[in-house]
Amino acid sequence: MIVKICGITNLEDALAAVEAGASALGFNFYPRSPRYIAPEAAGRLIQSLPGEVWKVGVFVNEPPERVAELARQAGLDVVQLHGDEPPEAVPAGLRVWKAFRVGREFDASRLASYAVEACLLDAAEPGWFGGSGRVFDWSALPRLNVRIVVAGGLDASNVGTAVRTLRPWGVDACSRLESAPGKKDRHKMAAFIQAAREAEAA
């Protein structure tokens, strides 16, 4: 199971997440996010990270050509489309995760129309493209025949339940692991990763 820490803005937090056992780190390239990091800064940071840890760039409603360009510049392993991108906006030749916001109007049939490595499920919150810290109703999800990364309000207190309920391909946490927006709490990260791994093994 992939355990991703998202919203990384500095090398100290990145290394702490890696030390705690994270298998992927997320870098937010959406300028309106409090966790925004410039692609050039992310690229310099990524050069100091172990090769086996996946580096994921988070994009919101960017043209596919721009996504591909920044992925090359920053040295990303995966791009995560977290906006309202249609299936034709998936850039070719890249590993792509597509985020979907789960709420009352969530249509699970849409997932199959995207040619992506995995689908990330986050809580639907008006005006937010992720990072709201809200949890969606895991028990209400239909059976999905795609790789799922679960996000939305996860921390050490609830990730075990999410893993046992959904048996996802990955889990992703951000805002609940912070001491301030864009600044991670190393103890919260370590506890989250440990809880996720324990639930995976159960």
Image (spheres, grey):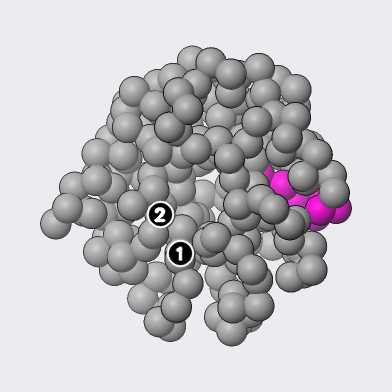
Q: Residues within 10 Å of mark 1 (few under 14, many from 20)?
A: many
- Name the residue tied to disc 1: 148
Image: 200 above or below 186: below
Residue 52 placement (x, y as % from top left): 43, 32
Vertically, is 11 above or below 193? Answer: above
Q: Is residue 187 magenta?
A: no
Left or right, residue 154 beside residue 99: left
Magenta segment: does it hold 63? yes
> 185 or 170: nearer the eye?
170
Residue 171 shown left or right of residue 48 in the figure: left
- The answer to whether marks 2 and 1 mark residues whose Cβ atoms lie closer than 8 Å is yes
Q: Secondary structure at mark 2?
A: strand
Q: Badge 2 is on which residue? A: 170
- What segment is highlighted magenta in the picture? 58-64
Residue 187, image x and y in percent?
32, 26
Residue 5 seen: no
Image x and y of residue 25, in percent: 50, 35
With respect to residue 33, does 99 lie above or below?
below
Give the mark nearest the N terminus, 2 or 1: 1
